[in-house]
């Protein structure tokens, strides 16, 4: 039987993990750097040969991924095989969701009704950095629509064993009706199915990058955690370039690190994403046309004993154009008990983290973004 997050021992374990994450983010944001900044870049990696190439070619790509994960924590991929038609179509669905649905229709899908934070998320309901509830003077301007894995979206059909973040068996997703938004679900499914398979493929490369067998994570991805979002960022009312000496008066999504293993990001514009470098300088990351941005998230950093870096980032729309993005936060089967990877432990570097179930970790991090720390659903 899968334990739920209400068990006292599990609750204490999760609260400790949440504290670890908040300490990490706070430390990254508060560190001051007085010396000259070091060169920083987000490498672009062509992964096309990893689909049909030899093991040696796959390992060569995995080595590039390892270097990126141990340094910037971010990289971009091309040659990923996701059709451009699916990429464009999901951005169209994002535009339709935020513009064609009435306020009442969106309100009926408000994430406050979902214990899994699924559905429509207005800009004033969450902060990605929980500390911002106490300190933020600049509200986040984003709106979101959130959903997670379900077997109907999985091109493999799933294995019938999917469990939700808390171990429940129900489908926690909330969708607009076909009458309200015709073709929306089909458009989401087309894109999600491609990117879900891409996530599974990338995990094989992550395995090789960590000195593990290519198939190491396969049994943990039969019904993987795969929360995704449509995000809308309104145009700037006073567009200005990034100035490290000037506080921003407009923020789309505040400084944060992601929760799961890694993120696959599609965006409608080449600008908006900003990464906090190791020198604690905000770096504007431009997106390669046709590519995806990949970044390490907290759970993979935890799993690798801090070898792979979960990098702090934010979104600021500094243009007069609307911006849409579609991140997929890829994880493993939520009931998986995750312990530090054996290749990341040594006598001189023992495991820093206690084991925890993947879903329990993510759910508590999600609830921490709301003002009262949980959803009442």
Image (tube, rainbow, N blue to C red):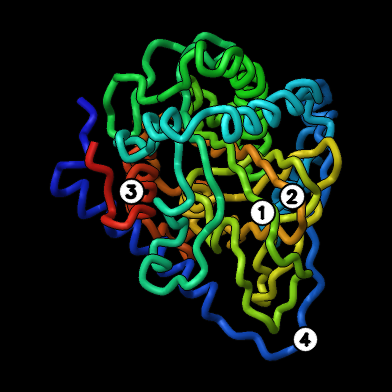
**Element marked by disc 3:** helix
Q: Which mark is residue 215?
A: none
**Element marked by disc 2:** strand
Q: Earlier in the sequence, mark 4 or mark 3?
A: 4
**Res. 349 visible in picture:** yes
Q: CA distance from mark 4 to mark 2?
A: 23 Å
Camera-nearest residue between 232 and 353:
232
Q: Which label lies toward us, 2 or 3? A: 3
For the residues labelled 1 and 2, say whether their Cβ atoms are less than 8 Å apart. Answer: yes
Q: Which label lies toward us, 1 or 2? A: 2
Q: Earlier in the sequence, mark 4 or mark 2?
A: 4
Residue assigned mark 4: 36
Residue assigned mark 1: 69
Residue 152 locus on image (x, y percent): 50, 12
**Element marked by disc 1:** helix
Q: Earlier in the sequence, mark 4 or mark 1?
A: 4
State the quadrant of the N terminus: top left
Q: Residues within 10 Å of mark 4 (few under 14, many from 20)?
A: few
Residue assigned mark 3: 367
Q: Earlier in the sequence, mark 1 or mark 3?
A: 1
Residue 316 locus on image (x, y percent): 66, 60
On screen, residue 174 versus residue 71, left or right, reads: left
């Amino acid at each position: 039987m899968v334990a739920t997050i209400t068990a006292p021992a599990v609750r204490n374990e999760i609260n400790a993990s949440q504290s670890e994450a908040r300490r990490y983010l706070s430390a990254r944001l508060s560190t001051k750097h007085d010396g000259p900044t070091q060169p920083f870049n987000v490498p672009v990696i062509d992964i096309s040969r990893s689909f049909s190439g030899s093991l040696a070619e796959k390992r060569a790509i995995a080595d590039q991924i390892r270097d990126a994960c141990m340094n910037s924590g971010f990289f971009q991929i091309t040659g990923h095989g996701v059709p451009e038609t699916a990429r464009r179509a999901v951005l169209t669905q994002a535009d339709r969701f935020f513009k064609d649905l009435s306020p009442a229709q969106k309100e009926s899908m408000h994430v406050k009704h979902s214990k899994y934070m699924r559905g429509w998320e207005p800009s004033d309901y969450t902060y990605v950095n929980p500390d911002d509830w106490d300190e933020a003077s600049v509200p986040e301007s984003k709106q979101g629509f959130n959903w997670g894995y379900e077997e109907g979206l999985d091109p493999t059909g799933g294995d019938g064993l999917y469990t939700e973040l808390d171990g429940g068996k129900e489908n926690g997703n909330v969708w607009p009706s076909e009458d309200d938004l015709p073709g929306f679900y089909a458009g989401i499914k087309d894109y999600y199915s491609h990117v879900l398979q891409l996530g599974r493929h990338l995990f094989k490369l992550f395995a090789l990058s960590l000195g593990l067998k290519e198939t190491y994570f396969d049994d943990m991805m039969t019904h993987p955690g795969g929360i995704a979002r449509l995000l809308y960022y309104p145009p700037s009312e006073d567009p200005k370039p990034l100035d490290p000496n000037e506080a921003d008066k407009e923020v789309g999504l505040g400084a944060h690190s992601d929760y799961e293993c890694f993120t696959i990001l599609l965006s409608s514009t080449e600008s908006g994403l900003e990464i906090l470098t190791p020198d604690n300088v905000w770096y504007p990351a431009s997106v390669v046309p046709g590519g995806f941005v990949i970044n390490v998230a907290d759970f993979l950093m935890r799993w690798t004993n801090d070898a792979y870096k979960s990098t702090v980032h934010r979104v600021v729309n500094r243009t007069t154009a609307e911006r849409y993005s579609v991140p997929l936060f890829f994880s493993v089967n939520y009931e998986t008990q995750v312990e530090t990877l054996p290749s990341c432990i040594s006598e001189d570097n023992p495991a820093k983290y206690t084991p925890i179930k993947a879903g329990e970790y993510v759910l508590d991090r999600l609830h921490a973004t709301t003002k009262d720390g949980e959803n009442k659903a």
